[in-house]
Amino acid sequence: MSSYDFDLFVIGAGSGGVRASRMAAAMGAKVAVAEERHLGGTCVNIGCVPKKLMVYASHFAEEFEDAAGFGWTVGPRNFDWSTLIANKNCEITRLNGIYERLLTDAGVEIVEGRAVLEGPHSVVVAGRRITAKYILIATGGLPVRPTEPGQELGIVSDDVFFLEKQPERLLVAGGGYIAVEFAGVFAGLGSKVTQLYRGDLFLRGFDDDLRKALAAEMPKKHVDLRFKTIIEWTVKTSNGLLAELSGGQTLEVDQILYAIGRRPNTAALGLEAAGVAVDGKGGIVVDAHFRTSVPSIYALGDVTNRVQLTPVALAEGMAVAKTLFGGQPTSVDYADIPTAVFSQPPIGTVGLSEAVARKLYGAVDIYRSSFRPMKHTLSGRDETTMMKLVVERQTQRVVGAHMLGPDAAEIVQGLGIALKAGATKQVFDATIGIHPTAAEEFVTMRERLPDPEEAKAAE
Ligand code: FAD
């Protein structure tokens, strides 16, 4: 019999921690999981789920307007923030209950409170010392706050889901997907939104055509985008918050949302006491099987500061359970992870951007199409959908598929399977489209864009 209290002790009941706990228990391990806030972690409580509900809420404004072109008369409309937040809270409480049942039904003990590592096999939670053969750190990440004077007057994404009032004027600082998504949500809900980003163009790392296409669409949806701009300082005024921006302009708003990045949640976790190594950015260093520098301690998800997405944390949780208790050392394949930005319009993307593909393969063929979505021929809305395929010239393998437009996330999930299977452009061409859809464009793009190198040589 084991001399430890548990076979596995998991710190953090978020996406990765819950999956690893349940799967390990299903494989026969004695498991406990500590959670200091709410079951389900970031995604369920202050991330993907409430965010997507807010995206749905914000879309109605356009739906009501678009309906007129189809013959509908929509009566007076009014949006009530407190109803949205109350209904969202109800749904999240329901999900918290589901997570609790999933864990207890699997035989996992839930330990409420903050866990701190004490050594390679022990943790302390609310004064209780618990030992385990293996410990899994799944503590996630936290929003980064800026340093400029007055930053404490602003909020971060954790707070935005619980605001008592919808800000009439909102300043969003940041250029990552979370900043872009909230700018779209609040603009859709009727707030006057300004989004600042310090660089030339937001969504660094995404395909450049996607970034440019979204930057062209957001102002049409009343987001005032300002690149190469930062907040210098902020003060409180009788009417709200006054921010001085780089360049000397000032902007008065009701709320400032900082969405400038996330960092691994490792502070005061006892990593040093246990001897767990972190990288330069505070992420816990792990090997291909999620083992840290301490052989009995594992880590996964956002705390390892690699791919910060729920489905990735889930896959990692499964891999840890299989490695430790399934007799199958398992790693995760990080190639071709499909992902979305729930911007307005949304982005769906999988594989390599054109720039990365050119660096990696030299010669690539690009297919790109831009068009007005069919729905907007009658709604009259000025919105453009963009789709793009990046093809490795030598093998004709499709190595990137990118879309900006309605349902992009739903469409690109399927393309993720095609890329994972190594589909070539010929396979795409041989696939019959579904008509009339936007998605069919991905199998009907025949005209390769002129190659920039060939065009230069021909001059
Ligand atoms: P988390 O889910 O963050 O869970 C960590 C848990 O550990 C938390 O519950 C925390 O309370 C607990 N904890 C921390 N320290 C301790 C301790 N010492 N003791 C006990 N408990 C502790 N991903 C997507 O795939 N799609 C999206 O659309 C998406 N949208 C997002 C939107 C926002 C606003 C944010 C912030 C994130 C979003 N993400 C999205 C990212 C996704 O939420 C994370 O990648 C995912 O939750 C990471 O899971 P995790 O298991 O690593 O950690």
Image (cartoon, rainbow, N blue to C red):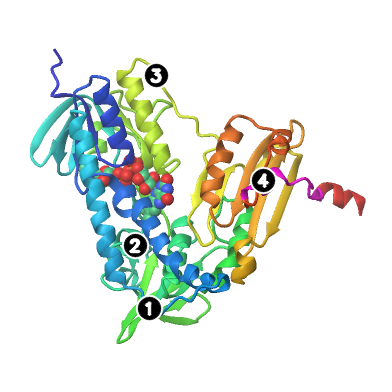
Which numbered circle lies on residue 168?
1
Disc 2 C-beta below 8 A from ligand 1? no
Q: What residue is shown with label 2? A: 156
Q: Earlier in the sequence, mark 4 or mark 1?
A: 1
Mark 2 Cα within 10 Å, few/some/many (few <14, many 20+)?
A: many
Identify the secondary structure beneath mark 3.
loop
Viewer-side residue, 347 vs 63: 63
Identify the secondary structure beneath mark 2.
strand
Q: Earlier in the sequence, mark 2 or mark 3?
A: 2
Q: Position of residue 103 (x, y in %)?
A: 21, 34
User: In the rendered structure, which amino acid carries the disc numbered 3?
Assistant: Pro
Number of numbered discs visible in the structure rendering? 4
**Mark pair 1, 3: CA separation:** 52 Å
Q: What residue is shown with label 4? A: 442
Q: Where are the magenta residues, as a range?
A: 439-452
Q: Earlier in the sequence, mark 3 or mark 4?
A: 3
Left or right: 361 as drawn, with respect to 87: right
Q: Do the residues bearing badges 2 and 3 touch, measured as CB atoms within 8 Å?
A: no
Q: What residue is shown with label 3? A: 329
Q: Position of residue 234 (x, y in %)?
A: 37, 76
Residue 453 in view of the camera: yes
